[in-house]
Image (cartoon, rainbow, N blue to C red):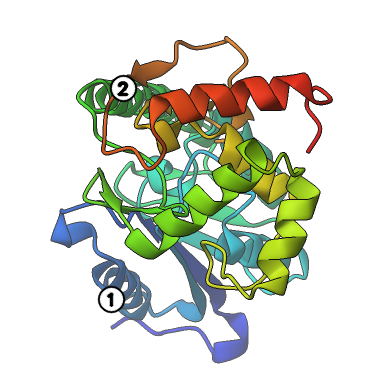
Amino acid sequence: MSMSLPEHAKLRVAAYCRVSTDREDQANSFENQRRYFMACIERNPDWVLQHIYADEGISGTSTKKRRQFNAMIAAARAGEIDLILTKEVSRFARNTLDTLTYTRELCRRGIGVLFLIDNIDTRQQDGELRLTIMSSIAQEESRKTSQRVKWGQTRRMEQGVVFGGSLLGYDVQNGQMVLNPAGAETVRLIFHKCLQEHKSAAVIAGELCAAGIPSSRGRVKWSAATVWKILKNEKYCGDLIQKKTYTPDYLTHEKRYNRGQERFVVIRDHHVPIIDRDTWEATQRELASRRVGRP
């Protein structure tokens, strides 16, 4: 007959789970993982639940934005955890460096990490070797997934699917540019003030505020920079240029302006224009005649 340890002698066990929102596999759903860990801890009489930490819908390639993961590490550093359970290496982190950095720190503090499906226990002698191999495989799979997603998005862009949000004069619905009549009138007014009245972006912004005309966000708040961006946006003459930003590192997901590092996806006459092409080109010449790059 097995006897459980007194409460003060039990291992304080935390669990960490992460579920991507785009996964269709219901066995890996957020709530199912929580129940899975609860049952696992309750089955072991020498364990007591410290907390279940769960991040939902956040990429696994970096730990920076995973608030619950970071809260768990903080609790471990505060001496509140003896053992961490996680389902598999790819759920913990897909960055080999992050995985090893955290597990090594935890081991130094006497805290083990148990990867249940991968059958890896960092408290065992071969734990780190096996973990290094598995985390490297997970990171490589993440790189391949990133490449596949990027390739698929580019192909869809080439087919005319719009990636990005709505803007003044257009609502983006199901990847299509849909004309917004009220916003379109404001766009035409801005181009008229610039080209026909030769007003600067700053003056136009002031007049829009004075007239109580709302911006794309529904607020009567305009700046010279906002007006300038509208006057330079090729979407208003019906063209579409995508991939203006790109992600150089799949691990950090940090976006940067595309200054020729990747090929732009350009489609001329993609959607119904708000500004005819002659007016658009004349406006660009007007802007070029002013101080370069200044509103």
Q: Where residue 35 is drawn, which disc sits there?
A: 1
Residue 124 in percent (x, y) is at 52, 41
In the picture, residue 30 is in which quadrant?
bottom left
Asked if one can make out residue 199 in the rendered structure from this viewpoint, the answer is yes
Judged left or right of residue 243, residue 256 is right
Which residue is at the front of the view, 120 or 2?
A: 120
In the picture, residue 290 is in which quadrant?
top right
- In what element is the residue under mark 1? helix
Kind of residue sitting beneath label 2: Thr
**Label 2 with label 1: CB-CB less than 8 Å:** no
Q: Where residue 17 is drawn, which disc sits there?
A: none
In the picture, residue 207 is in which quadrant?
bottom right
Which residue is at the front of the view, 81 or 3?
A: 81
Disc on the earlier residue, 2 or 1: 1
Up/down of 247 relative to 20, above or below: above
Up/down of 18 relative to 259, above or below: below
Residue bearing the label numbered 2: 154
- Give the Cα separation between the discs numbered 2 and 1: 39 Å
Kind of residue sitting beneath label 1: Arg
Judged left or right of residue 204, residue 38 is left
Q: Residues within 10 Å of mark 2 (few under 14, many from 20)?
A: some
Q: Residues within 10 Å of mark 1 (few under 14, many from 20)?
A: few
